[in-house]
Amino acid sequence: MPIRAVLWDVDDTIFDYAAADRTGMRLHLETVGLPEAYASPDEALAAWKAITAVHWARVAAGETDFLGQRRDRVRDFLTRPMTDAEADDWFAGHLIHYEAAWALFPDVLPTLDRLVPAYRHAILSNSSSHNQHRKLTALGVRDRFEALVCAVELGVSKPEAGAFLAACEALALEPHEVAYVGDEPDIDASGAVAAGLTGIWLDRRGRGGRSDLIRITGLDQLPGLLAGDTRFGAPDTFG
């Protein structure tokens, strides 16, 4: 049976999260000053990225909630105790600059346009529905996706099969009728495959090295892949 819908990750797949987060934090640090724990802005930015990854993993594991991970990221980054209100205030400064830097990757809108009307579209994210709805609305693409399924409300995160199956259920489709596109090889593509979907790894950074996965390096390759073009590693029976 052919693919009938594309299920999308958001951050670093259609939304350039890494660039916005880095720009937002750099500008915030220019305003509030570089914490004493770091010798340079680059060192601080690298630490912020690593700390963010640690605390998002805690959210996925059910160890904290969306607001809690923000506060803990700030405490770890500044290496000092802080009340919730103090952490919220500090993060709010970063948020202003971060949101000002929000942008879609350039290949997103052309790809979505090419895939209409052949495929339905929905979102599956390990973030919160409130956060991703607001973000996608600000980026002007929320109405492109008929369903928005997020781990915070769902109670299960990618790569668990339950997250992918819940998104398929929201579309009233069987897993084999759905392709999932995401930037993480294990959390996104491999997790989708294990749940019975067609997992597609969007390897924008050209990391490679995963011959077990269907891999593309840009969304411009996706329409041809879904149509059965095998140049990008799709099996002959794909679609």
Image (cartoon, helix red, strand yellow):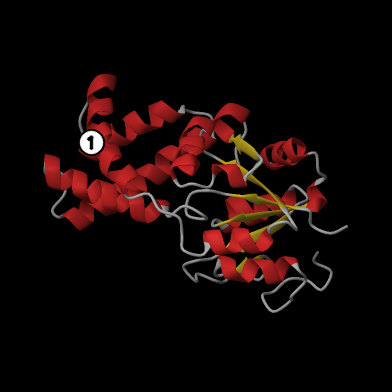
Residue beneath the point at 21% across and 36% down: 79
Q: Is residue 90 above or below residue 125?
A: above
Query: How far across and down, in percent of the image, does residue 192 sit?
Result: 69, 51
Q: Is residue 129 above or below residue 233?
A: above
Q: Give left or right: position of 239 versus 163.
A: right
Residue beneath the point at 22% across and 24% down: 86
Task: Say what secondary structure mark 1 lies in.
Answer: helix
Q: Spot the residue most to the bottom.
A: 231
In terms of image quadrants, where is residue 129? top right
Residue beneath the point at 27% across and 52% down: 23
Query: How far across and down, in percent of the image, does residue 142 sit?
Result: 55, 42
Residue 210 appearing in the image: no
Q: Give left or right: position of 202 versus 179.
A: left
Q: Amino acid at mark 1?
A: Gly
Q: Give left or right: position of 180 versus 76.
A: right
In front of the other: 150 or 54: 150
In front of the other: 151 or 113: 113
In terms of image quadrants, where is residue 236? bottom right
Q: Is residue 211 above or below residue 105?
A: below
Residue 175 appearing in the image: yes
Residue beneath the point at 81% across and 64% down: 239
Count the numbered circles shown: 1
Q: Is residue 168 above or below residue 5?
A: above
Q: Which residue is mark 1?
A: 93
Query: How far across and down, in percent of the image, does residue 201 sit?
Result: 61, 61
